[in-house]
Image (cartoon, helix red, strand yellow):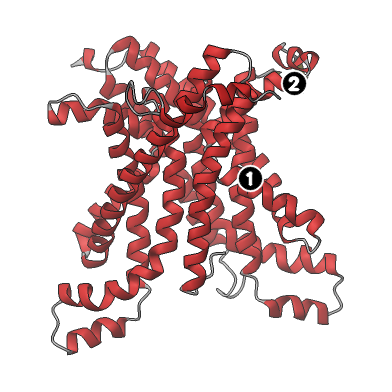
C-alpha cells in the first residue's frame, strides 16, 4: 500500500481544479448533496402533504407519479433529465443541474411517503380537535399537525439524505467532476494505485455518511422513535 | 411512423441487456439473502467477537456509495490479487451441468456480482434484524417453557416469524438490487442501462431507447410487488391468525 498518490493529488480530490478551474472533487460532492437535500426536502414536504390532503383520483395520480420515480434506477433518471431538461427549457443545462434535478425528484418521492406516514401517525383526534376549535383544514395542518409530525420525520429525512450523498456519485455517468469522477480520472492517469485511490475515496464518503447517520440516531433517540 | 420505432437489432440489444439485469439481480438476491442472514446472526450475537466485525461491515458497506465499491472491486481488488488467480478468473472455464453448459462469466460480471452482493447483504441483514426484533419476547419465553433447546427456539419459533415480518422490506431490497444492478454499467457490464445508452448513441432515438429500458425496469418492479402481495395473502404475517 502506497498512499503517496493520495497525498500528491489531495487538493484535486478535495477541490477539483479549483481555484484555476471549476469546483470539483469532495467539495462538489458536498455542494451537490446540500442543494439536492434541500430541494428533495421541499419536494417531499409538498408531495407528502398533498398525499395526506387528497382523496380519490388526484391521490392515485400522485401515487402513480411518485411510484414512477421510485421504480426506476437513479442512472435512468439522470439519463432522462440529461436528455429532457434542455428540450423542456430550451437552454443548455449543466451536468450539475441535471444531477440535482434527478436526485431531488427521487429523494422527494421517497420523502413524500415518509411525510405522509408521519402525518397519518397522529391520532385523528388531533384533526377533530382542531376542527372543533374552528380551524380550517389548512390551518389545522399548519398549526396543529405539522408541528407534531415534523419531529417524527427527522430521522427518515436524514436517512434519505445519506442515500442521497451516496447517489451523488452517479453524477459520474454524465461526467460531472465530483469525487468519484475525479477518483477515476486520477486512477486512469496514474494507472498504478487504484486500490489506494478507491479506499481513500470510500473513506471520504464514509465520513460524510456516518456523520449524518450519527445525527439521525441522536435525533431518533431524542424523540424516542428508536432507530438506533 | 415505422422509422420512429427501434429496429429489431436494437430491440435485441435491449432484451439481451434486460436478461443480464434479471439474471444478475436474481443471483445477487439469492446470495445476498444468505449472506445477510449470516451477518444478521453475527450482529445480534451476544459475543463481541461476532457482533463487532458484523457491525463494522454493516457500517462500511452501508455508508459508502455502491459505485465506489464496484470501482474498488473491479480496479482495486484486481491490483491486489495474485497474478495466478487473476489469470484464472479471466480465462473462460466450461462446465457441463446436465442439460446446460455454463459459460464462465466475464471479470466485469464477477466483480459486479461480488460488489452488489456484499452491498445488498448489508441492507438485508438490517431488515432481518428488525424482523427478529419484531418477534414478541413472550414467544421465546413460551418456547423455552415448552422445553425447546435454544437452537430449536431459533429454528422453529423466532426465524419463521422474523422471516414473515421481514418479507415486505426484503422484497424492497430485491427491487433495490434490480435498480442497483444498473450501476454495473460503469464497470462495463452490458446490462439494461448500458444497452439503452448504446442503442441511443447508435440510433439517436433517445426517447425510444430510454423508454423501452425504463418500461422494462418498471415492469420488473411491478412483478416483484405483485409477487409480494400474493405471498403475503398466502402467508399472512403473525397476528393475522391461522397460517
Could you tell me how far apart the alpha carbons at marks 1 and 2 are, in whole angstroms?
23 Å
Nearer to me, A76 or A169: A169
Q: Is residue A227 above or below residue B16?
A: below
> Is residue A7 toward the left or the right of residue A208 in the image?
right
> Is residue B39 toward the left or the right of residue A140 in the image?
right
Q: Can residue A125 be seen by looking at this rendering?
A: yes
> Is residue B165 toward the left or the right of residue A135 in the image?
right
Q: Residues within 10 Å of mark 1 (few under 14, many from 20)?
A: many
Give the secondary structure at mark 1: helix
Disc assigned to residue B81: 2
Q: Quadrant of the N terminus of chain B?
A: top left
Task: Point out residue B214 in the picture as x, y percentages from the top left corner.
Answer: 36, 32
Task: Point out residue B5 in the picture as x, y percentages from the top left corner.
Answer: 26, 18
The answer to the question of whether label 1 and label 2 lie on touching residues, with beta carbons closer than 8 A, is no
- The chain containing the residue under callout 2 comes to B
Q: Residues within 10 Å of mark 2 (few under 14, many from 20)?
A: few
Which picture quadrant has residue B234?
bottom right
**Residue that mark 1 sits on:** B121
Nearer to me, A26 or B122: A26
Amino acid at each position: 500500500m502506497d498512499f503517496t498518490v493520495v497525498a500528491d493529488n489531495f487538493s484535486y480530490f478535495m477541490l477539483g481544479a479549483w481555484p484555476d478551474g471549476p469546483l470539483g472533487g469532495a467539495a462538489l460532492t458536498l455542494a451537490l448533496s446540500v442543494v439536492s437535500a434541500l430541494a428533495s426536502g421541499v419536494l417531499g414536504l409538498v408531495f407528502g402533504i398533498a398525499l395526506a390532503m387528497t382523496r380519490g383520483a388526484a391521490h392515485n395520480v400522485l401515487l402513480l407519479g411518485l411510484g414512477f420515480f421510485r421504480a426506476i434506477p437513479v442512472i435512468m433518471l439522470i439519463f432522462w433529465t440529461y436528455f429532457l431538461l434542455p428540450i423542456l427549457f430550451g437552454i443548455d443545462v449543466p451536468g450539475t443541474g441535471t444531477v440535482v434535478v434527478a436526485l431531488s425528484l427521487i429523494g422527494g418521492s421517497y420523502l413524500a411517503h415518509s411525510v405522509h406516514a408521519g402525518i397519518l401517525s397522529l391520532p385523528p383526534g388531533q384533526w377533530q380537535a382542531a376542527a372543533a376549535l374552528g380551524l380550517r383544514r389548512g390551518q389545522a395542518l399548519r398549526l396543529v399537525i405539522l408541528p407534531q409530525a415534523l419531529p417524527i420525520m427527522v430521522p427518515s429525512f436524514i436517512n434519505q439524505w445519506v442515500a442521497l450523498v451516496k447517489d451523488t456519485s452517479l453524477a459520474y455517468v454524465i461526467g460531472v467532476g465530483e469525487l468519484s469522477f475525479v477518483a477515476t480520472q486520477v486512477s486512469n492517469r496514474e494507472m498504478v494505485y487504484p486500490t489506494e485511490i478507491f479506499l481513500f475515496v470510500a473513506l471520504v464518503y464514509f465520513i460524510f455518511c456516518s456523520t449524518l447517520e450519527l445525527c439521525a440516531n441522536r435525533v431518533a433517540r431524542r424523540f424516542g422513535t428508536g432507530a438506533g | 411512423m415505422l422509422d420512429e420505432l427501434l429496429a429489431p437489432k436494437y430491440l435485441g440489444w435491449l432484451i439481451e441487456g434486460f436478461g443480464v439485469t434479471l439474471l444478475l439481480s436474481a443471483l445477487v438476491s439469492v446470495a445476498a439473502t444468505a449472506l445477510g442472514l449470516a451477518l444478521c446472526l453475527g450482529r445480534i450475537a451476544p459475543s463481541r467477537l461476532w457482533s463487532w466485525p458484523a457491525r463494522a461491515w454493516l457500517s462500511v458497506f452501508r455508508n459508502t456509495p455502491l459505485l465506489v465499491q464496484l470501482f474498488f472491486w473491479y480496479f482495486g481488488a484486481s491490483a491486489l490479487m495474485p497474478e495466478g488467480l487473476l489469470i484464472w478468473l479471466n480465462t473462460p472455464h466450461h462446465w457441463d451441468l446436465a442439460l446446460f453448459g455454463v459459460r464462465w462469466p466475464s471479470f466485469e460480471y464477477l466483480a459486479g456480482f461480488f460488489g452488489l452482493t456484499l452491498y445488498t447483504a448489508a441492507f438485508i441483514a438490517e431488515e432481518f434484524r428488525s424482523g427478529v426484533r419484531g418477534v414478541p419476547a413472550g414467544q421465546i419465553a413460551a418456547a423455552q417453557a415448552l422445553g425447546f433447546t435454544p437452537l430449536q427456539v431459533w429454528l422453529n419459533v423466532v426465524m419463521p416469524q422474523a422471516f414473515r415480518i421481514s418479507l415486505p422490506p426484503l422484497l424492497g431490497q430485491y427491487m433495490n438490487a434490480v435498480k442497483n444492478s444498473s450501476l454495473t454499467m460503469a464497470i462495463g457490464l452490458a446490462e439494461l442501462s448500458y444497452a439503452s445508452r448504446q442503442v441511443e448513441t447508435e440510433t439517436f432515438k433517445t426517447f425510444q431507447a430510454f423508454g423501452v429500458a425504463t418500461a422494462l425496469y418498471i415492469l420488473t418492479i411491478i412483478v416483484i410487488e405483485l409477487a409480494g402481495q400474493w405471498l403475503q395473502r398466502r402467508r399472512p404475517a403473525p397476528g393475522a391468525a391461522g397460517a
